[in-house]
Image: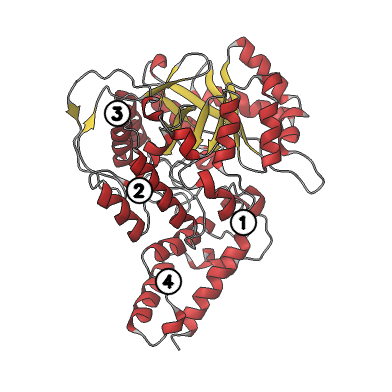
């Protein structure tokens, strides 16, 4: 079934929550790039229903990109602490405006996310929020270490039950043919244990998140007959629907993922709805295309409205580290306005152009950084290159004598110097330790060498 057939007539599929006309509050102007200004409605959040009839906000709060004290990121300041007050404020605002799904993991933000999430949520009645966390046993999948991680989550989150528990990010197969899923969850007895925990009520919904090979995804979907998955988490957005495989051959198009789960009636949680923020900060041409159609809507809202057209989606996670992000995303979902046929066609054109744009498909998840033996800021290098590309600051070497080349060269090199010298692309030793941890299956060393070669050519042209 193609997208147009599937979406035809779905504008009535959005299940709205209570729409009591209670006025608006917090009408602050939104300052974050890619987000809109305007009043934020209250009591109009859009909800979906999970496998057991629980009402879930269509907007989920992803606790992977939280603010740190003093601003910046943990890449720039690895010893920084999370800004708990800012986190509390954003969580308070989200709950006040109907968001009830919060997603974290033991490995997010160097292990600090679960505790910060627990502190923020524990200040609210337990029936006001739903918590999702994960068995992120990437390095040590022994039963002892995995069970310790599982039990630590309860303590850090300050809960006696976990609403949504995920087997975190499976999908790989070793050169010897060993399945990542079987190694981390089946052969060590963990999955059978978690099924029993679900029976005991300590886990209310058991599911998994996927990044990897289609054969592994299909195999785990088929396990639904045995394990009765309550939900599944996949990467999906208006680009990945048709172009994920084209952008990176090892990735699976979201069309296949969604339709396979929909056929089994398995509720779906969406990650990377904004493709690591890149769909909220499109290049000037694509941004202008959408803004000309809807001047008062944010770029991010287009991506969320697209996902809201799919009735099997239970919630879409947004990693929000500014209050402006929370406000704009709540505005989009309170209530969610379905896309028209013309708007869907426009997004398809934008997706096609985006997919064929020569950017590096990094979502800044940072899974790679802790595995680099020389400490390269891999996402930082990629972000810099993509930003320069978006801002037309990639110099055309065929016009070395032209003023435009000199302007672009100057802009590129000036911003590149902001990356700490020892963490720049040219320090890559080609060990490939990062690659197996990249959910987007990027050939990271090859991209770093591309950036190194390009930067060196620009420097050489100064002579």
- Residue 231 visible in the picture: yes
Residue 106 in view (yes/no): no
Mark seen at residue 55 = none
Specify the quadrant that holds the C terminus.
bottom left
Mark 3 or mark 1, which has the lower sequence index?
Answer: 3
C-alpha span from label 2 to label 4: 31 Å
Q: Residues within 10 Å of mark 1 (few under 14, many from 20)?
A: some
Circle 2 residue: 70
Whether the residues at callouts 2 and 4 have beta carbons within 8 Å, the answer is: no
Question: Measured along the vertical axis of the image, is residue 148 above or below residue 77?
Answer: above
Q: In the image, residue 311 lies at what x, y percent?
A: 46, 27
Dot 4: few (<14), some (14–19), or many (≥20) neighbours within 10 Å? Answer: many
Residue at 34% x, 43% y: name it: 342
- Indicate which disc, 2 or 3, sits on the residue closer to the N terminus: 2
Write down the residue under mark 4: 394
* 195 on left or right of 65: right
Looking at the rendered structure, the secondary structure element under dot 3 is loop
Task: Determine which quarter of the picture holds residue 307.
Answer: top left
Residue 423 on image: x %, y %: 53, 63
Q: Is residue 307 left or right of residue 444?
A: left
According to the image, label 1 marks what residue? 372
State left or right for residue 157 relative to residue 211. Answer: left
């Amino acid at each position: 079934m193609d997208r147009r057939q599937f979406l035809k007539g779905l504008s009535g599929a959005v299940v709205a929550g209570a729409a009591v006309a209670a006025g608006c509050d917090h009408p602050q102007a939104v300052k974050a790039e890619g987000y809109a200004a305007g009043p934020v409605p209250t009591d109009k959040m859009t909800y979906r229903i999970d496998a057991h009839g629980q009402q879930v906000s269509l907007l989920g709060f992803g606790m992977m990109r939280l603010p740190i004290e003093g601003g910046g990121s943990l890449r720039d300041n690895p010893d920084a602490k999370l800004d708990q007050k800012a986190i509390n404020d954003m969580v308070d605002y989200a709950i006040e405006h109907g968001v009830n799904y919060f997603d974290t993991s033991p490995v997010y933000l160097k292990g600090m996310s679960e505790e910060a999430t627990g502190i923020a949520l524990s200040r609210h009645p337990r029936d006001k929020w739903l918590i999702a966390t994960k068995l992120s046993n990437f390095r040590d999948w022994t039963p002892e270490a995995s069970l310790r991680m599982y039990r630590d989550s309860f303590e850090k989150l300050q809960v006696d039950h976990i609403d949504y528990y995920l087997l975190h990010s499976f999908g790989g197969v070793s050169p010897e043919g060993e399945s990542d899923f079987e190694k981390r969850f089946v052969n060590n007895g963990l999955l059978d244990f978690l099924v029993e925990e679900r029976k005991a009520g300590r886990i209310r919904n058991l599911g998994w998140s996927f990044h990897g090979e289609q054969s592994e995804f299909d195999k785990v979907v088929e396990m639904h007959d045995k394990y009765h998955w309550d939900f599944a988490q996949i990467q999906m957005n208006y680009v990945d629907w048709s172009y994920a495989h084209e952008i990176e051959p090892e990735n699976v198009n979201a069309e296949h993922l969604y339709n396979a789960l929909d056929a089994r009636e398995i509720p779906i949680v969406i990650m990377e709805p904004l493709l690591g923020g890149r769909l909220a900060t499109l290049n000037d041409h694509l941004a202008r295309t959408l803004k000309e159609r809807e001047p008062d809507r944010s770029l991010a809202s287009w991506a969320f409205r697209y996902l809201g057209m799919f009735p099997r989606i239970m919630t879409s996670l947004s990693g929000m580290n500014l209050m402006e992000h929370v406000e704009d995303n709540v505005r989009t979902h309170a209530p969610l306005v379905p896309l028209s046929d013309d708007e869907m066609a426009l997004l398809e054109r934008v997706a096609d152009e985006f997919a064929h744009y020569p950017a590096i498909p990094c979502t800044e998840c940072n899974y790679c950084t802790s595995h680099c033996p020389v400490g390269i800021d891999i996402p930082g290098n990629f972000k810099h290159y993509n930003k320069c590309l978006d801002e037309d600051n990639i110099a055309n070497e065929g016009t070395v004598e032209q003023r435009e080349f000199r302007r672009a060269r100057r802009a590129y090199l000036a911003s590149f110097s902001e990356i700490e010298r020892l963490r720049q692309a040219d320090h890559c030793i080609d060990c490939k330790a990062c690659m197996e941890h990249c959910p987007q299956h990027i050939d990271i060393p090859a991209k770093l060498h591309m950036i190194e070669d390009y930067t060196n050519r620009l420097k050489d042209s100064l002579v």
